[in-house]
Image (cartoon, grey):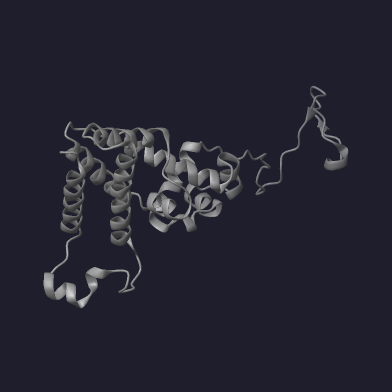
Amino acid sequence: MLDDPATSGQLPDADPSTGDAVTPMPPTGSAPRRRGRPNVLTREQVVDAATVVANEDGLDRLSFRSLGARLGVAPMTVHRTIGGLDDLHAELVRRTVDEFADRFTWPDDWRDVVRVFATTFRDLLLRHPLVLESHSSRAPLASTESDAVVARVVDALRAEGLGTEEAMYTFFVVYDFVVGHTAVQVGRGDSEAGRPERHRLVAEMLGSHSYEARFTLGLDVLVAGIEARLPR
């Protein structure tokens, strides 16, 4: 192969014994010129890194720059792999919710169905704050797997005599309780108004505050209220 004279400035030297062209060696101490190839990522790697960043720092801190720094690549490499940030947000929430939906082992009694849904959903939100944040500011937690969870709870309530509309709204009452309770628990702010367990009266009456006891009692109240509405 011949070098381009316009770039090399001269024709390659010839081996006097064979007459073949010889490529000149680079000067001592100079680095050989390499043709770089872009780093290759998989979508799975990007979503894994995005899950960590979003859970630790919040969705607002999720960017191609922060992901590139975590993965050791250029931000544009992340962009080429995953597309836009909106698509990334949707995918990481969908994957997390689907993994949560796969964890259910459903009991037979409707009360236990409600309790299993509420406690497992709360566990998801506590372990993955990104899901709670996305739910509050971006999109509903909807996926094929999550639809199956909703149907299981609603069907259990309908089997006890609630109409379809009331059963669905009852599911949402439980859902809203879990979201609201967890939002208070994981809130990172220092405002006293947003943290009622810090109020002086609470301390005087309880001595100490337990989110576990608070959640358990709230769920007991909900289940009792649902039972009171069932046809006799």
| Along the viewing direction, whichever of 14 and 182 lies nearer the viewer | 182
Q: Is residue 137 left or right of residue 80?
A: left
Residue reaching furthest bottom? 200
Q: Is residue 88 visible?
A: yes
Q: Position of residue 213 (x, y in %)?
A: 15, 57
Q: Residue at x 29, y 45 (%)?
A: 170
Judge by depth and name the residue closer to the eye, 94 or 154: 154
| Residue sitting farthest toward the top | 18
Query: Residue 187 at x, y = what percent?
Result: 33, 63
In the picture, measured across the screen, residue 138 lies left or right of residue 96, that is: right
In the displayed structure, 19 sits above or below 125; it is above
Residue 44 position, x and y percent, is: 46, 37
Residue 89 vs residue 115, the one in the foreground: 115
Q: Is residue 89 left or right of residue 188?
A: right
Residue appearing at x 43%, y 44% in the figure: 93
Where is the C terminus found, in terms of image quarters? top left
Q: Residue at x 20, y 51 (%)?
A: 219
Residue 206, relative to residue 221: is it above or below?
below
* Residue 101 vs residue 9, the one in the foreground: 101
Q: Position of residue 210 (x, y in %)?
A: 17, 61
Q: Is residue 83 above or below residue 219?
A: above
The answer to whether any part of residue 103 appears in the image is: no
The N terminus sits in image quarter? top right
Question: How many numbered callouts?
Answer: 0
Q: Image point 84% across, 42% down: which residue?
A: 7
Q: Is residue 148 above or below residue 65?
A: above
Is 128 on the left-hand or right-hand side of 202? right
Residue furthest toward the front? 232
